[in-house]
Amino acid sequence: MTIIETTNLTKTFDGFTAVDHIQFSVKKGEIFGFLGPNGAGKTTTIKMLTTLLYPSEGSATIAGFDILKQRANVRENIGIVFQEPALDTELTGRENLDFHARMYGLTQETRKKRITEVLTLVDLLGKKDIVVKHYSGGMKRRLEIARGLMHSPTVLFLDEPTLGLDAQTRRAIWEYIKQLNKEENTTIFLTTHYMDEADFLCDRIGIIDQGKILVIDTVDTLKKSVGHDVITIACSDSGQLQQRLEQEPWVNNITPHETFLTVGVQRGEEKIPTIFEIARTIPVSISSIDVRKPTLDDVFLYYTGRSMREQNPETSQSQATRPAGFHWRRRP
Amino acid sequence: MNQKDLQAVYMLWLRQMKRFFRAKSRVLSTILQPLFFLFILGFGFNIAVFPGMQGPYINFLAPGLIAMTILLSSMFTGVSVLWDRQSGFLQEVLVAPVSRLSIVIGRTVGGATVALFQGFIIMFIALAMGVPIVNLQGLLLTILIMVLLSFTAVGFGLILASKMRDFEGFQSIMSLILMPLMFLSSAFYPVNESLPGWLQILSYGNPLFYMIDGIRGSLTGVNNVLHPLVDLGIILVLCIVIMGLGTYFFNKSEV
């Protein structure tokens, strides 16, 4: 059963196209992720799907309801955790949830039950009567996730759910997301620019860049499309080496970067001697070489020709590929 | 308006009550400020003689201060949509499955309650200081005008908030719009033939003038220019127009 379905969804702001005719669908019960750099159009897409912005063109349905014509029905079926905090910091945690529950028309009985349930899920039951301005960043995020779940939505939108949080809190929030997806069978649509987050959480991923979806598939299939292994080579003349390697039949793909090459191959460790062999005949001297399993960063690179890390120097918390320090050691 | 929308109105009202009464400093300052005006101006100008004014100056001043208190507080509520937008909370309200109209009504009723609470405090203090009430009907009419004034001011605040994106604008609005509005409203001195003609014209063009004139006419029964019921008619039309515009602009604004 399809929960989200878009057709040519487009948003332009003063001539700038933030979201460009995107088309995708999300199935019931899955965790679907939009992976892309800042400014790729992720948040704009979420705002259109949650009826906060009007699309310039195209449309979408959520749980069978049209986002333009059946806005109230759409709103009843969605929960959303915004990228920026959207809590009333002058109210307590419980009051924020109660406000939400009443806005969604829950009965008093359901309200009480759900508040305890969702607060237990995010470990905030003991802090429910504290005014939110005294909460830490992680606690606020958890409270927002709990709030998004209050009315048991068909689909929960999470816009960069762990942005700016420390590693420990991120882990915990990932666990909550997994858990609620399993226990409440909530369909989840999330956006992120963290590779590890998309990798850990998502069943399927759409890679989005400059308002366009470049590819949608399962994480495994995406990684395999890059090659079973990725060899990273730093050498004296990467241009020449690339030209030469492109002729080899066992090279799935090859991508040049400023100071190194990445080569997608099968059985990478067996190809290293061959590469040295080839390099010696050119001759090009190899300064470092590394074999590893492909990461989503490789996938992103493959489809966009750019590394996400290059565009987000300030958000390098991602534990994705780190081409700078190569090792002979093979990483799992 | 169905059950759900009514509950949303109630919830938005409740939120404002909680926020207001938790912000102790705001409660205090909104009461103290007009109180200073009432005491200092009231006693300071008591010896001054204004042509055509009947009774002591404080009887003249009190209706103006009641209106001013309500105006400031209500406008603040309208403009505070900006705060909600900045803090992101507005998004939470806008994605809820309730009509935009109920959101506007909830905020208006909440803002009006706070403003009337403050207005009544000033009124009671003024009455305690010896400002006379003309009769019961007058008092009821005064309360009606106070409610309408507060709705109008919230609507005006909503219009401003939809046109502004940040708080810097708020400061300049306060001095550019509020100050002339207050000084030209007959709150502090009577508007009559003894004033220069241009000043009279500006005063009669000022919506706040009719609100204060109406309260003055209905509460104290002296020093008013128009009959309070004429004022009420003008205020009613103003209120409907401004609230309509406020709702329209709020509906149109995206997050």
Image: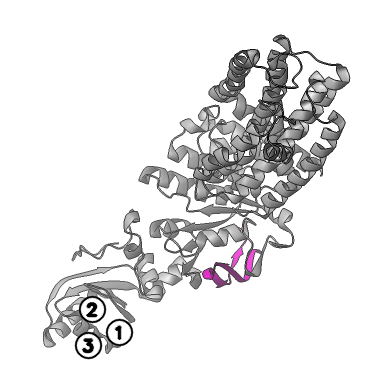
Q: Distance between the residues labelled 3 and 2?
A: 14 Å
Q: Position of residue B93 (x, y in %)?
A: 64, 45
Q: Is A4 rendered above or below residue B4?
A: below
The mark nearer the N terminus, 3 or 2, is 3
**B174 vs B152, nearest the viewer:** B174
Q: Do the residues labelled 1 and 2 touch (CB within 8 Å)?
A: yes
Q: Which three-letter amino acid code belongs to the residue tagged 1?
A: Trp
Q: Which three-letter amino acid code belongs to the residue tagged 2?
A: Lys
- The mark found on residue B41 in the picture is none
Quadrant the N terminus of chain A occupies = bottom right
Residues drawn in magenta: A3-31
Q: How far apart are marks 1 and 3 (CA)?
A: 12 Å
Q: Where is residue A79 in the image (x, y as percent from the top left)?
A: 61, 50
The subunit carrying tag 1 is A
Secondary structure under the numbered disc 2 in the rendered image: helix
Residue at coordinates 82% horizontally, 23% vertically from top-left? B218
Whether marks 3 and 2 lie on the same chain: yes
- The mark found on residue A271 in the picture is 2
- The mark found on residue A244 in the picture is 3
**A156 vs B78, nearest the viewer:** B78
* For residue A48, side relative to residue A239 (left or right): right
Secondary structure under the numbered disc 1 in the rendered image: loop
